[in-house]
Image: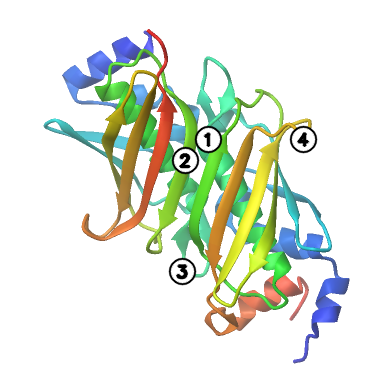
């Protein structure tokens, strides 16, 4: 079956990203959703406030681990949306700087983009914020290993690239 | 009971479940903790809701990171006599092997404790300690007493 890249892009990177995230049990469990994917693959995810994810009941602030999951997923999804064909790209490393405490009872948004795609490795950067993207609560850089399309089962690739593919 | 008292009573009884139950995120992903002499090992039992790679399947990298970060802050709380959970400054994780859908273990090591900041090295493994699935390091702000 021929699925040209153009057809896939026409369906929208945002829905590609959402289909990808819907395959990840933990992301579904914590209610991660895609807000937007720009034409370059820059991905914004939405993490709703969840008392189950709180790290400190005195402050009601969500744990850094939830931010790590948000940023790892935003970065990984940005990789998926920046590569033409679907490739499984495991995280090689991730660094998060916590600039300030998040506000309780508010969602956290995570933005990530790929700033360099090489033959073997994809380099990502991003930030997490609540109300103001110019005033982030955390910065994040990561690297992802490209495994190549041959390592990705065809059924999974098709499921992510085209939701209704039979 | 405040956290410091909970730590003291957990040290006495060897049962850390009540301490961990104070942290909703720990309960959510399912963190457990066991003491071996002066050492402590944290365990994350296999849990379908923590999966982030449906193909292998493997645990979500963010959950492994969160588990390690949480273990490091609990470690400081348990052994460095800090009155409350320390604040994370930065966290850096290297993914060395796939974190399969099975129990995961974490051990922490205090690399440097200053007056205001602590540096903790964190190791996670599944099959054997000598084959870590991830290593991480984190800086924490030590809360003032």
Q: Circle 2 — which element?
A: strand
- Choose mark 3 or mark 2, whichever is in front: 2
Question: Which is more toward the observer, B107 or A144?
Answer: A144
Sort mark 2 into few (<14), some (14-19) or many (20+) by Cα contacts within 10 Å: many
The residue labelled by disc 1 is A64
Q: Can you tell which mark lies on residue B91? A: 2
Q: Are marks 3 and 2 in contact (CB under 8 Å)?
A: no
What whole-number distance in Å separates the C-alpha atoms at marks 4 and 1? 20 Å
What whole-number distance in Å separates the C-alpha atoms at marks 2 and 1? 9 Å
Q: Are marks 4 and 3 on the same chain?
A: no
| The quarter of the displayed image where residue A166 is located | bottom right
The residue labelled by disc 3 is B56
Q: Are marks 4 and 3 in contact (CB under 8 Å)?
A: no
Q: Circle 1 — which element?
A: helix
Question: Which is more toward the observer, B118 or A35?
Answer: B118
The residue labelled by disc 4 is A134
Instruction: Give the chain of mark 3.
Output: B
Q: Circle 4 — which element?
A: loop
From this viewpoint, is residue A25 visible? yes
Decide if residue B89 is on the left or right side of residue A166. left
- Choose mark 2 or mark 1, whichever is in front: 2
Looking at marks 3 and 2 on the same chain, the residue that comes earlier in the sequence is marked by 3
From this viewpoint, is residue B49 visible? no
């Amino acid at each position: 079956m021929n699925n040209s890249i153009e057809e896939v892009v026409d369906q929208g990177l945002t829905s590609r990203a959402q289909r990808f995230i819907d395959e990840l049990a933990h992301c579904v469990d914590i209610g991660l959703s895609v807000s937007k994917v720009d034409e370059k693959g820059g991905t914004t995810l939405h993490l709703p406030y969840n008392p189950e994810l709180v790290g400190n009941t005195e402050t009601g602030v969500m744990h850094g681990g939830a931010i790590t999951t948000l940023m790892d997923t935003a970065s990984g999804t940005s990789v998926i949306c920046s590569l033409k064909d679907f490739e499984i790209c495991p995280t090689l490393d991730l660094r998060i700087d916590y600039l300030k405490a998040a506000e309780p009872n508010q969602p956290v948004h995570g933005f990530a983009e790929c700033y360099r795609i090489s033959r073997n490795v994809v380099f990502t950067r991003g930030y997490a914020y609540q109300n103001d993207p110019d005033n982030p609560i955390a910065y994040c850089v990561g690297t992802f290993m490209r495994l190549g399309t041959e390592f990705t089962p065809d059924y999974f690739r098709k499921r992510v690239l085209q939701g209704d593919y039979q | 009971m405040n956290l410091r008292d909970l730590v003291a009573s957990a040290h006495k009884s060897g049962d850390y479940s009540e301490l961990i139950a104070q942290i909703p995120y720990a309960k959510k992903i399912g963190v457990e903790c066991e003491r071996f002499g002066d050492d402590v090992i944290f365990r994350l039992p296999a849990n379908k809701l923590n999966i982030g790679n449906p193909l292998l399947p493997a645990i979500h990298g963010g959950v492994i990171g969160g588990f390690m970060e949480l273990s490091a802050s609990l470690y400081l709380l348990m052994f460095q006599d800090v009155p409350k959970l320390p604040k994370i400054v930065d966290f850096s994780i290297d993914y060395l092997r796939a974190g399969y859908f099975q129990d995961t273990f974490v051990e922490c090591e205090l690399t440097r404790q200053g007056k205001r900041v602590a540096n903790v090295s964190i190791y996670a493994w599944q099959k054997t300690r000598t084959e870590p699935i991830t290593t991480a390091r984190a800086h924490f702000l030590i809360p003032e007493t």
